[in-house]
Amino acid sequence: MAAAPSEKRSRKRSEKSVVVVGGGIGGLTAAALLAHQGYGVTVFDQAQVPGGCASTFKRRGFTFDVGATQVAGLEPGGIHHQIFTTLDIPLPESTPCDPACAVYLPGETEPISIWRDPDRWRAERQRQFPGSEPFWQLLQTLFQASWRFQGRQPVLPPRNLWDLGQLVSALRPDTLITAPFTFSTVGQILKLFGLYGDGQRPACGHRRLKTFLDLQLKLYSQVDADETALLYAATALGVSQAPIGLSHLEGSMQVLSDRLVAALQRDGASCCWATPWSGFTSTRATHWGDGA
Ligand SMILES: Cc1cc2nc3c(=O)[nH]c(=O)nc-3n(C[C@H](O)[C@H](O)[C@H](O)COP(=O)(O)OP(=O)(O)OC[C@H]3O[C@@H](n4cnc5c(N)ncnc54)[C@H](O)[C@@H]3O)c2cc1C
């Protein structure tokens, strides 16, 4: 007779144990998926609370996000949706960000609004940056191809044969369209389209486009258009529109890690906060859930 899933889990737990160093969203997600598979999991984080760059702190009754404020991937098929479904935990309540961002260029009083609705955003950017549509269409094409590629879960960069297999199996003919742009930056493509705004073409507001992109990209990649890889920018600038879109979580970003921690607790993992990992000799620990 086949073993029940819970039996299989506890059998695997007794066989294999995993230590996850770092209780940010990445570590918590990996840990929760492993614990759900039945591995004995222990998470260490040097911080007092889980969540890393997506955690919060409280002052005078207010909750502040320490880093991340907006979430993508909550839509059906999105990465958080998939993970929460796999873990059998409810997705946090959320409110769509619309606009995802309102950008005030230096010296201007009207914002450029990055609307959730693709048609509304197209109309906005055509009004704000006349003549730039071919650039946006290229970004859109690259985004769609690389989003489908990312959805097939390639491992990048591949470090062993299994990773390479995952990477190759994620490739499709439409992925090839991204290949010529692998090493391009946004700045180079702006120049290619004559949109860099450096005076080579008649002044028609392209400097505003470059400034807008610099501001947006510094948010996502910490560098400006000249240094941001085009394929990364295509994704970063493309996720704001439906059917993907960005959301604010009800409560705060902490809800995301709290739900993952709840899944870890349920699946018998141990978490040690305020515990810098320094190898197997680490002793200072705040424990809960010694079920592993
Ligand atoms: C200011 C800011 C704004 C952002 N805004 C957004 C946003 O709006 N939307 C979005 O999707 N993303 C945003 N991001 C990015 C997002 O927050 C991160 O990509 C994500 O949270 C990273 O998760 P992680 O688990 O990979 O790493 P981290 O969150 O960095 O987690 C790593 C964890 O490891 C712990 N750690 C490290 N070394 C040790 C050790 N030796 N022992 C024990 N613990 C250790 C750290 O304490 C930390 O908790 C933002 C990031 C920043 C900084």
Image (spheres, helix red, strand yellow):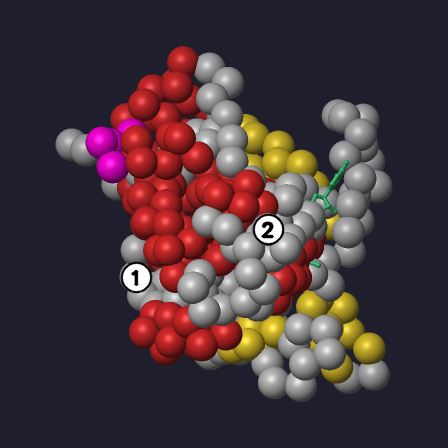
Q: Does the rendering let one see residue 230?
A: yes
Q: Is residue 94 above or below residue 292?
A: below
In depth, the one of 131 and 220 nearer the eye is 131
- Residue 171 in the image: state x and y as whole percent: 29, 30
- Residue 152 in the image: state x and y as whole percent: 31, 38
Q: Are marks 1 and 2 in contact (CB under 8 Å)?
A: no
In the image: residue 36, left or right of residue 42: left
Most frequent secondary structure within the magenta stretch: helix
Query: How busy is the neighbourhood of tag 2: few (under 14 within 10 Å), some, or many (20 plus)?
Result: few
Return the mark for residue 48: none
- Residue 258 in the image: state x and y as whole percent: 58, 62
Residue 38 in which image quadrant? top left
Residue 173: within the magenta?
A: yes
- The residue located at (40%, 13%) in the rendering is 161
**Which stretch appears magenta?**
170-174
In the picture, the quarter occupied by the N terminus is top left
In the image: residue 29, left or right of residue 135: right
Total numbered badges shown on the rendered structure: 2
Q: Is residue 165 above or below residue 22?
A: above
* Residue occupied by mark 1: 76
* Residue occupied by mark 2: 200
